[in-house]
Amino acid sequence: MNKYIALGLTLLLTLVLLGTLGCEDMQRSVKSFKANTVGIERKVVWTGFDGSRKVWEGRFKIESSKNGNVVYFIDDNGKTVILGPGYYSVEQ
């Protein structure tokens, strides 16, 4: 009898896991958790108003100030990078 209960619980757990992994909301939640903890592999390209250009590639989390006009992240060397006036694009 215990064998059947264990088999039923294993089957139920497997079905629940397969159901949630295929769910788009669950995938989004996993990606959001990953981004908040270890960052996501990204490429940031910043172009200043004067035409100067700088590129960063690595695994980091990008944040912005409360009013949204300053974007910053910590690069692979542990330095905080603050993107000032200009245009930037992020590829994930």
Image: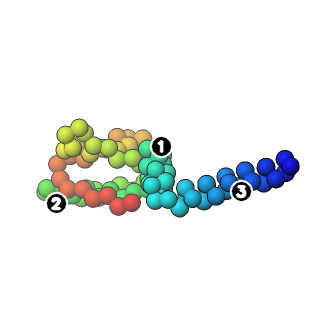
Query: On the rendered structure, is 45 left or right of 42?
Result: left
State the SS at label 1.
helix
Give the residue type that dot 2 points to: Gly
- The tag on residue 37 is 1
Q: Residue at x 84, y 47 (%)?
A: 2
Q: Give whichever of discs 2 and 1 has the lower sequence position.
A: 1
* Residue density around tag 2, few if under 14, some if 14–19, many if 20 or more, within 10 Å: few
Q: Position of residue 92 (x, y in %)?
A: 39, 60
Q: CA distance from mark 1 to mark 3?
A: 32 Å
Residue occupying the far left of the picture: 50
Q: CA distance from mark 3 to mark 2?
A: 60 Å
Q: Position of residue 49 (x, y in %)?
A: 13, 56
Q: Which of the 4 image quadrants contains residue 55?
A: bottom left
Q: Viewer-nearest of labels 3 and 2?
A: 3
Q: Residue at x 45, y 55 (%)?
A: 25
Q: Nearer the viewer, residue 33 or 54?
A: 33
Q: Position of residue 39 (x, y in %)?
A: 44, 48
Q: Residue at x 21, y 44 (%)?
A: 68
Q: Give whichever of discs 3 and 2 has the lower sequence position.
A: 3
Asked whether the beta carbons under mark 3 and mark 2 sit within 8 Å of each other, the answer is no
Query: On the rendered structure, is 90 left or right of 58?
Result: left
On the image, numbered disc 2 is attached to which residue? 51
Give the residue type that dot 1 points to: Thr
* Residue 20 appears in view: yes
